[in-house]
Amino acid sequence: MRSPYKNYSQPFKDVEVRHGLRTAAILKHLESEGIIRDEYIPLIYMKVARHNDSIKAGIYEFSKPMTSEEVLDKLIRGDVVAKSITVREGLDRFAVAHIFVQEGFGRDAEWDKLTADPELIRDVAPEAKSLEGYLFPDTYKFNPGTPPRAIVQAMVANFRKHFGGEMNYITTGLNLHETVTLASIVETEARMPQERPLVASVYLNRINRKMLLGADPTVIYALKLAKTWDGNIHKADLQIDSPYNTYRFHGLPPGPIANPGLASLQAAAAPAKSDFLYFVAKHDGTHAFATNIADHDRNVQIYQVQWYRDQRAAQAAGTQTTK
């Protein structure tokens, strides 16, 4: 009990103590992780000497030999380390919720209710119907047990911190909510940072010419809201009756379809000046841009139709060679 012990090879060892576990189960887990020598004497110690104390749930970091008494003191104090969670750009609020739920922060229903309420952003985006678009992508650190409400507040505050100072520099005539909405489409379409201002310019040009945006990611979001998204867009999906379907309804959708990062927000606030109205993916992460439908159709033929033909031909040739 009073002899320091360490039976793990790593310089640091993180051990999670989950909510609801009995003391005996926690001590057994600590023994299996090499933190304490055995579970029995510490269990007796807890029942006799520390029966008024309780072990706090959380993630604990160990880095040196410790006596069982020192280990128990650490757990009773709740000397936990924060969990590091990365939310990448372009995830919608449902995916963000899933990440945190998987890490033990709340449940899906709670996250859905919290992120559906736009109150935290109402002062700068009164048109917002949810917090979609305002859960700023970043790496966060939270102590285990942090309530989802506090996490959501931190993410929205982070949005204000990063983009708040740039709200007055929007060059397009769009308001903040429209800019975030455009940025969310740019985020889901552009993989290369240098192309984001160009992609933003395409959509802004189409808006100004009263053209349909025709953005696949908006259809995907409509399907997610309808709970019919199966991982693929089908031809019939392009006719879904939703204001998020930019193949049927002109202008921007009523709100963001994902949570954009700062680069996409900046691109939407100050797009490149171009005459482009179309773009098509080139399979290397970039796009081919066009100012008219004839050039666009030619690009589609080269970078989509012919590319897939070449792939199938190469695959068939390889199959014949190996026979």
Image: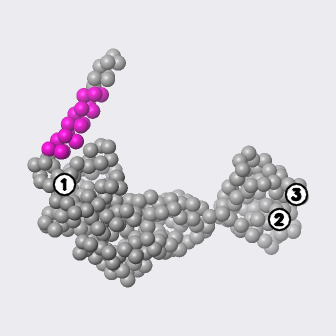
Tag 3 secondary structure: loop
Specify the farthest residue to the top: 323
Residue 139 placed where, x, y %? 51, 62
Q: Indicate the amino acid at tag 2.
A: Met
Color theme of the render: one colour
> Which residue occupies 76% across, 68% down?
76
> Which residue is labeled 2 in the image?
46
- Residue 246 visible, this orientation: no
> Which residue occupies 24% across, 28% down?
313
Residue 21 placed where, x, y %? 69, 61
Q: Could you classify mark 3 by the number of other residues whose Cα lies within 10 Å: few (under 14), some (14-19), or many (20 or more)?
A: some
Q: Is residue 38 left or right of residue 152?
A: right
Q: Earlier in the sequence, mark 1 or mark 3?
A: 3
Specify the farthest residue to the bottom: 123
Mark 3 and mark 2: span between their CA atoms?
12 Å
Q: Quadrant of residue 79?
A: bottom right
Contact (Cβ within 8 Å) of mark 3 with mark 2: no
Q: Nearer the viewer, mark 2 or mark 1?
A: 1
State the extent of the magenta-drawn residues as a range: 298-315
Tag 2 secondary structure: helix
Position of 91 relative to 172 (above/below): above
Depth check, front residue: 276 or 143: 276
> Which residue is labeled 1 in the image?
278
Residue 295 placed where, x, y %? 13, 48
Q: Nearer the viewer, mark 1 or mark 3?
A: 1
Magenta segment main secondary structure: helix
> Which residue is labeled 3 in the image?
1
Q: Could you classify mark 1 by the number of other residues whose Cα lies within 10 Å: few (under 14), some (14-19), or many (20 or more)?
A: many
Mark 1 and mark 3: span between their CA atoms?
71 Å
Q: Is residue 123 magenta?
A: no
